[in-house]
DNA sequence: CACAAGATAGAAACCGGTTGCAGAAAAAGC
DNA sequence: GCTTTTTCTGCAACCGGTTTCTATCTTGTG
């Protein structure tokens, strides 16, 4: 079953040449007589020879692989970004090594380890932000290029990254509700100190606050407790702010999944949407269209593509200057928003 | 920025020992004086030494990685299986190399290449079935263990695989509709000759046929044409069979996404669900619960876990006897099914 | 026909680790 | 105190490729 692997020397012996010649012949490098090349390729065929990748990597110093660090890729937005990144790699010789983060401990160890292990030629980090200056410094002195997608930190100055304009998105969502006439607008999202250190909720909430502030109105936020899965967490957080006497007439949710939690809370409390309550989500994942959720659409797949492209550019071109690309977001108005009942 | 990497010899020099000793000290192998080990580890720390993985792999012959071949992992069921598989790997030293299949050509080349490249210690194939005896034979003589999940072929006798009881699921769905009193029951799914050679639609349809046959009733199938994305394809296929004079009063969809397409077609045709039309899906993905879709639940995450576990067992234990594990499915009754209007 | 230039192919060093083997040093036994 | 045993460590071979350098064989030219 597992007979010993065929090596380049076996091929060389069979073709009556040296190992070096086999290597040259297979790589299509010049300086090999056509007849010889033919003999070599025949021997390769006959023995079903496949080069040992580890040996190739060792001697060339190229790994031909990209490591990706990504949290919970079953979540639709993350999955969409990852898919974008993967699609760029499809026509390249690079393999993709996935490091799926499922616990805060994994997050920390991956951040420390992966960029310094010389296993991949580059590292792509999706939706996970450096926690502090120490982590930023660690990434900066990584052995290989590192690119961040949907991830940022104030002191990151020299790492290329593709970020989403979350602040603008939160503002846009809130301003839309203001335009519709709402005055008591709530927000349901995550706490800043969530264990994975996700930053999007914080930024979207910041945009929300900015919009309210500009209109001279107070915020009504309900934040998910730690450890609660997002939908359930959002549901209970929403229940809290929707049960107050001067309850909001509209809610901005930090993402679509949480918006669905808000919708569930509304149903439980007997509030009709959008008559009694307007709800707006964020991401525009597939479900959003199905259930007619008004939301902020961000270019998920495009962010993955762009980030991977940036990484590949860096691999071939050497040190491209650090870039911080901000991708735009847009409002998609559907059925869960309307002017307040008055 | 990319100063030359630290090698084991640098560490050896600094610690005043030989490379062999460094290797032994780091691996925690016995036969190294405690004081020496300490010196070595200090040097490792000071130089921030990380072993070159390619070199390690070459000399030990172990790759410490698993290759996974998977189609469209943005699709929820595939993503769930993959996630199950990944979670098993989290506590192992193995890395995960993803080969995402996006086109039929990629499918073919991956099937040929991956199992024979000595890049991973094992290969996991998810939801992609061998097309013919030739491909089966190719997988059988792979250089490393291969395990299939949600994938099968009649002539696969010696490959371990975890399959879902799709025939039973199709039958179960249909029998439930029969129990409710439906007599004209349609099926919306894929053609057998779909380019990726997915087999689940075929098997579920087979179960559907068996159930109808047992009840002495005729089938009404509408199959998606090639190339159409699943929801839209299902919608047009459903429109076709729902526009006939003796239209079905219930439809079994090959999966939840297609069930949603059927629901859209029903809405377009002015049919109320479940009063005028019952719809039943397959998979029980997250959306199904949200929209109250009756469906057949299959253990998606568990299939991934089980398959990966089978592969790991094979890696440590050598040749375990070939297994074909069949995982059960169950009906989840929700709001899209009811007795026919009569 | 002699000689220079160019085309091929082999030998060997190298990539950076691991590991079997042997010798040196330390500990134990007499 | 000397031999024997055990412990520790260095040396060198090896993993399977790539690549440089050089020798040899052709071929072309004067």
Image (spheres, coloured by chain):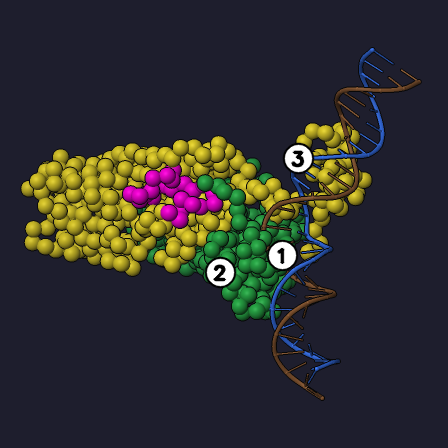
Chain colours: A yellow, B green, C brown, D blue
Mark 1 = which residue?
B60
Instruction: From the image, tell me which residue sits under label 3.
Output: A27
Binning the other alpha carbons within 10 Å of mark 2 as few (below 14), some (14 to 19) or many (20 upward) gives some
Disc marking residue B42:
2
> At 33% across and 53% down in the image, what residue appears?
A196
Callout 1 crowding tier (Cα within 10 Å): few <14, some 14–19, many ≥20: few
Instruction: State which chain disc 3 sits on.
Output: A
State the residue at coordinates (65%, 52%): B143
- Residue A284 in the image, given as x and y percentages of width and height: 30, 40
Percent across and percent down for residue B9 are 58, 53
The span from disc 1 to disc 3 (Cα, nearest Å) is 26 Å
Which chain hosts label 2? B
Q: Secondary structure at mark 3?
A: helix
Q: Picture quarter containing residue A126?
A: top left
Front disc: 2 or 3? 2
Q: Nearer the viewer, residue A325 or B117?
A: A325
Badge 2 element: helix
Please tell me whether mark 1 or mark 2 is closer to you in this view: 2
């Amino acid at each position: 079953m597992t007979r010993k692997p065929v090596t380049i020397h076996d091929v060389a012996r069979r073709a009556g040449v040296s190992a070096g010649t086999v290597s040259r012949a297979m790589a299509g490098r010049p300086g090999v007589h056509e007849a010889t090349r033919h003999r070599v390729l025949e021997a390769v065929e006959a023995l079903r020879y496949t080069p040992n990748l580890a040996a190739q990597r060792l001697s060339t110093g190229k790994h031909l692989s990209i490591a990706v660090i990504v949290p919970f890729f079953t979540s639709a937005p993350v999955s969409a970004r990852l898919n974008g990144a993967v699609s760029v790699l499809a026509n390249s010789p690079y393999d993709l090594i996935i490091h799926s983060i499922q616990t805060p401990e994994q997050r920390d160890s991956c951040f420390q380890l992966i960029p310094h292990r010389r296993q991949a030629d580059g590292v792509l980090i999706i939706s996970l932000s450096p926690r502090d200056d120490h982590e930023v410094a660690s990434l900066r002195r990584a052995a290989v290029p590192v690119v961040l997608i949907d991830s940022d930190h104030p002191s990151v100055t020299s790492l290329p990254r593709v970020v989403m304009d979350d602040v603008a998105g939160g503002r846009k969502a809130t301003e839309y509700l203001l335009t519709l006439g709402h005055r008591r607008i709530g927000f349901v999202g995550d706490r800043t100190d969530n264990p994975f250190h996700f930053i999007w909720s914080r930024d979207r909430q910041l945009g929300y606050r900015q919009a309210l502030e500009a209109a001279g109105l107070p915020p009504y936020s309900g934040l998910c407790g730690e450890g609660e899965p997002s939908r359930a967490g959002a549901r209970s957080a929403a229940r809290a702010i929707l049960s107050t006497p001067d309850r909001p007439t509209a809610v901005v949710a930090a993402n679509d999944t949480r918006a669905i939690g808000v919708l569930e809370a509304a149903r439980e409390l007997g509030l009709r949407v959008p008559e009694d309550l307007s709800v707006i989500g964020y991401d525009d994942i597939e479900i959003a269209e199905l259930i007619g959720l008004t939301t902020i659409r961000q270019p998920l797949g495009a962010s993955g593509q762009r980030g991977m492209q940036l990484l590949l550019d860096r691999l071939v071109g050497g040190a491209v200057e650090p870039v911080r690309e901000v991708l735009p977001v847009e409002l998609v108005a559907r059925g869960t928003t309307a002017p307040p009942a008055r």
